[in-house]
Amino acid sequence: MNGIKENSHLQKLLDDSLKKYSDSDFNNSKKIALQLLEESFKSKSPFFSANAYNVMAMNDEAVTDYVSAKEKYIKSKEICLKNNYPELLMLNYNGIGSTWVLENKDYETSNKFYEKSLHLADSLEHVFKHDVIVNIVWNQLDNEKLKSVSSYINELEFITTLDIKKHNYNRTLVSTAYLLLARYYAQIEQFGLADSNFNKATKTLNKLSLYEQLSEIYFYRSRYEEAKGNYKEAYHYLKEHIKNKEIFIGKDLRKNLMLENARYRLTEYERALIDSKRESLLMEDLAQSKTKTAWLYSILSIFLLLVIIMIYRENKIKNRLINTLNKSNKDLKAAKKEAEIAAKIKADFISNICPVLK
């Protein structure tokens, strides 16, 4: 029963952390994830430990700390591989792929992880495959691999048919699919299809304050019009790009400054958490050391007792030998004295007989 209560508590922490993340409250999202990590370690719940690392990585990625994000995605991945959590592993691979391209512009390594994520999404029949496909195509377009992109056109077309009325998540995904199709058709000079998809990408985001996404669409539309020599239109879309970018930056400037402060505070928080864990481990080590020391003292005491017994026995034997040798020496001295007396008697006897014989 306690296990169920613990799991429900850990699940609530996970849900709260994800909710804060979806609200762009990265500071509190990561704090809750750190709490989840600590409590999941204590209760030996690897599933929640893996999720904690994954959410922490998502927050790091959101504030552009790609090195830290990659480390945490990899930690989550290792737990998933050890305990067989394929759905979470799918998210890990996608996250690692994103950090490789965002941090290093390493498209090849990034795509390897995206492909692993896509393979898992296919095997699980998970809708997350659409997100992974968008990431793969974006990579290939940036890396000018048009032949690779062509194999995903049908998938992108399917994504544009998703229901956008339920929530904004699908809306941004559909808009991105239209943008990628527009970029692809622009590069292969199918301008009619490019124009159509650029317009659909913009229209999908209508009446929503998604300034970052709109800014991105206008940026690529401006480059497209410039490449065609339509400088007036290019200038118009460039202005739209700048306008939406400024609204986005203005709207989020305070939040971004708060994120920088949050990043610093969280670094300190993580350090304190690590120090706390080190202290805990140290106490465990000391406790184990005390036990080991007690055993060592016991063993040494027994060993010393055996040595003392052996020394006592050796001394006893040695004293016996000394006594035997002393007695032997006395006997030898007595025998030697008797031999000397006998030799003198014999010499005196011979000396007395010799004159008579003469």
Image (spheres, rainbow, N blue to C red):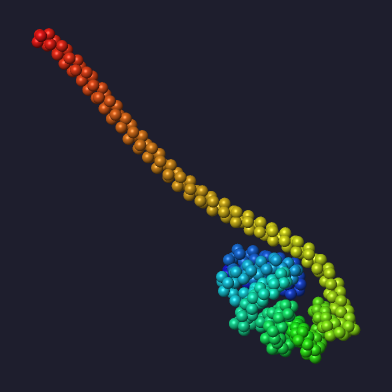
Q: Is residue 96 visible?
A: yes
User: For this view, does 328 lie left or right of residue 116?
Assistant: left
Total numbered labels placed on residues in the image: 0
**Depth check, front residue: 309 or 132:** 132
**Depth check, front residue: 292 or 330:** 330
Estimate the x, y position of residue 249 in percent, counting from the top left.
84, 72
Q: Locate residue 9: give its quadrant.
A: bottom right
- Taking the spot 14% from the left edge, 10% from the top edge, the residue there is 352
Estimate the x, y position of residue 227 in percent, counting from the top left.
83, 83
**Depth check, front residue: 67 or 78:** 67
- Quadrant the C terminus occupies: top left
Looking at the image, which residue sits at the far front?
358
**Depth check, front residue: 115 or 86:** 115
- Taking the spot 80% from the left edge, 86% from the top edge, the residue there is 198
Q: Is residue 178 visible?
A: no
- Taking the spot 76% from the left edge, 86% from the top edge, the residue there is 188
- Taking the spot 88% from the left edge, 79% from the top edge, the residue there is 239
Looking at the image, which residue sits at the far right?
232
Estimate the x, y position of residue 18 in percent, counting from the top left.
70, 73
Estimate the x, y position of residue 265 in percent, counting from the top left.
75, 61
- Quadrant the N terminus occupies: bottom right
User: For this view, does 44 lie left or right of residue 148?
Assistant: left
Q: Locate residue 121: give its quadrant.
A: bottom right
From the viewer's perspective, is residue 89 above or below residue 338?
Answer: below
Q: Locate residue 251: give its quadrant.
A: bottom right
Looking at the image, which residue sits at the far bottom?
192
From the viewer's perspective, is residue 110 above or below residue 236?
Answer: above
User: For this view, does 235 lie left or right of residue 148?
Assistant: right
